[in-house]
Image (cartoon, rainbow, N blue to C red):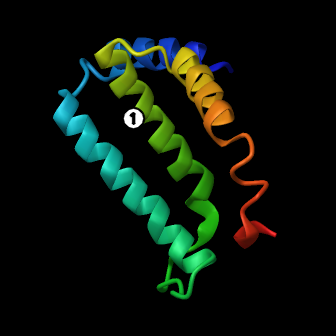
C-alpha cells in the first residue's frame, strides 16, 4: 500500500467506523501515547529494561502501525499529503546531508 492510499483507506475507516476524527490536539496526544508504547517495547527488547510478567515484544509491529495510523489521521486533518511530504523531505536530507554522514568519524 502506498502512503497516499493508506491515508485514503484510513479516512474511509474513520468515516465508516470511527464516526469522526478526534480533534487534532487529541490525535497528537494519542500519537505521543502510541510512541510511548513503542518506546516501552524497545527499552525492554533492545535496551536495558526487562519485560514485566506478561509483556513481550510481540506487539512491536502493531505499535508501529498504530503510530502510522494516527500520523495519517493528523495528515488527513491538516491537508498534508504524506507521500509528497516524504519525497520532499528525502530530497532535502539528500541535498543537505549527502556528504555529512560519510565523513562522520563516529559512524565508521
Q: Is residue 28 visible?
A: yes
Spot occupied by residue 22 in the image (x, y as percentages of width and height): 21, 28
Quadrant including the N terminus: top right
Spot occupied by residue 65 in the image (x, y as percentages of width and height): 54, 41
For residue 87, side relative to residue 25 (left or right): right
For residue 17, side relative to residue 66 (left or right): left
Q: Give the vertical position of 40 relative to 64 (above or below).
A: below
Q: SS at mark 1?
A: helix
Q: Give the vertical position of 77 relative to 69 (above or below).
A: above
Q: Nearer the viewer, residue 24 or 8?
A: 24
Which residue is at a point 72% across and 63% down the rendered structure image?
A: 104
**Label 1 belongs to which residue?**
70
Q: Is residue 6 visible?
A: no
Q: Quadrant of residue 18?
A: top left
Q: Give the vertical position of 54 relative to 103 (above or below).
A: below
Spot occupied by residue 81 in the image (x, y as percentages of width and height): 48, 14
Spot occupied by residue 11 in the image (x, y as percentages of width and height): 41, 14
Amino acid at each position: 500500500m502506498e502512503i497516499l492510499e493508506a491515508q485514503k483507506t484510513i479516512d474511509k475507516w474513520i468515516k465508516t467506523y470511527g464516526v469522526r476524527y478526534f480533534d487534532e490536539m487529541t490525535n497528537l496526544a494519542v500519537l505521543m501515547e502510541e510512541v510511548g508504547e513503542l518506546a516501552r517495547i524497545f527499552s525492554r527488547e533492545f535496551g536495558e529494561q526487562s519485560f514485566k510478567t506478561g509483556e513481550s515484544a510481540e506487539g512491536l509491529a502493531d505499535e508501529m502501525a498504530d503510530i502510522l495510523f494516527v500520523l495519517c489521521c493528523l495528515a488527513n486533518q491538516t491537508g498534508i499529503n504524506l507521500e509528497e511530504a516524504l519525497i520532499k523531505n528525502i530530497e532535502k536530507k539528500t541535498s543537505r546531508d549527502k556528504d555529512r554522514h560519510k565523513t562522520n568519524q563516529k559512524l565508521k
